Amino acid sequence: MKHKDIDTKEFKKFFEENSFVLLDVRTEEEFKLGHIKDASNIDFYHGSFEASIDELDKRERYLVYCRSGNRSRQTMFLMRDLGFDEVYNLEGGIIAWNDEGFEIHK
């Protein structure tokens, strides 16, 4: 099983492979302000968060991000504990992604 923090360049490389499911774990309001293309939003603070994560296909490969990397890091470990095979967390979150000048969709 692979679960680790990765930097923006590696995250972008994985994202461009199109073989990963992209998860944004920020609030719906944060998501609407701008997100990475094709990301699905599951709010970390929502009461059904863990159940929503547990319903996902554990055999898929996941890229997870949030605002700064904290919520997504916790999500990565939750997913590991729930039996997901491969989950990568974006270090520095969408802030780091934006700082690199990578595309954000609104």
Image (spheres, grey):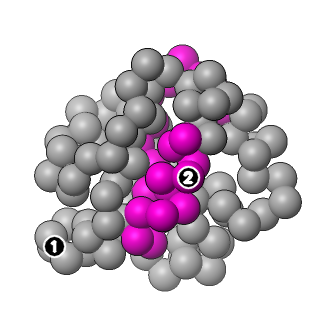
| Residue type marked 1 | Gly
Residue at x 26% of width, y 47% of height: 6
Closer to the camera in the image, 26 or 105: 26
Marks 1 and 2, how far apart at CA: 25 Å
Q: Are marks 1 and 2 in contact (CB under 8 Å)?
A: no
Residue at x 15% of width, y 52% of height: 9
Q: Is residue 99 above or below residue 21?
A: below
Closer to the camera in the image, 32 or 76: 76
Mark 2 burial class by Cα count in 10 Å: few <14, some 14-19, many 20+:
few
Residue 70 included in the magenta stretch of the image: yes
Residue at x 26% of width, y 67% of height: 97
Residue extending furthest toward the right: 47
Q: Which quarter of the image is occupied by the C terminus?
A: bottom left
Question: Which image quadrant is residue 99 in?
Answer: bottom left
Q: Which residue is mark 1?
A: 101
Residue 68 included in the magenta stretch of the image: yes
| Residue type marked 2 | Gln
The x and y percentages for residue 82 are 67, 29
What is the span of residues highlighted in magenta in the rendered image?
56-77
Residue 35, visible in the rendered structure: no
* Mark 1 vs 2, N-terminal side: 2
Q: Is residue 66 above or below residue 73?
A: below
Q: Is residue 73 above or below residue 61?
A: below
Residue at x 56% of width, y 52% of height: 74
Task: Classify residue 16 as left or right of residue 29.
Answer: left
Task: Classify residue 15 as left or right of residue 100.
Answer: right
The x and y percentages for residue 102 are 20, 66
Q: Which residue is mark 2?
A: 74
Residue 91, visible in the rendered structure: yes
Closer to the camera in the image, 32 or 89: 89
> Residue 84, which numbered label?
none
Task: Classify residue 63 as left or right of residue 78.
Answer: left
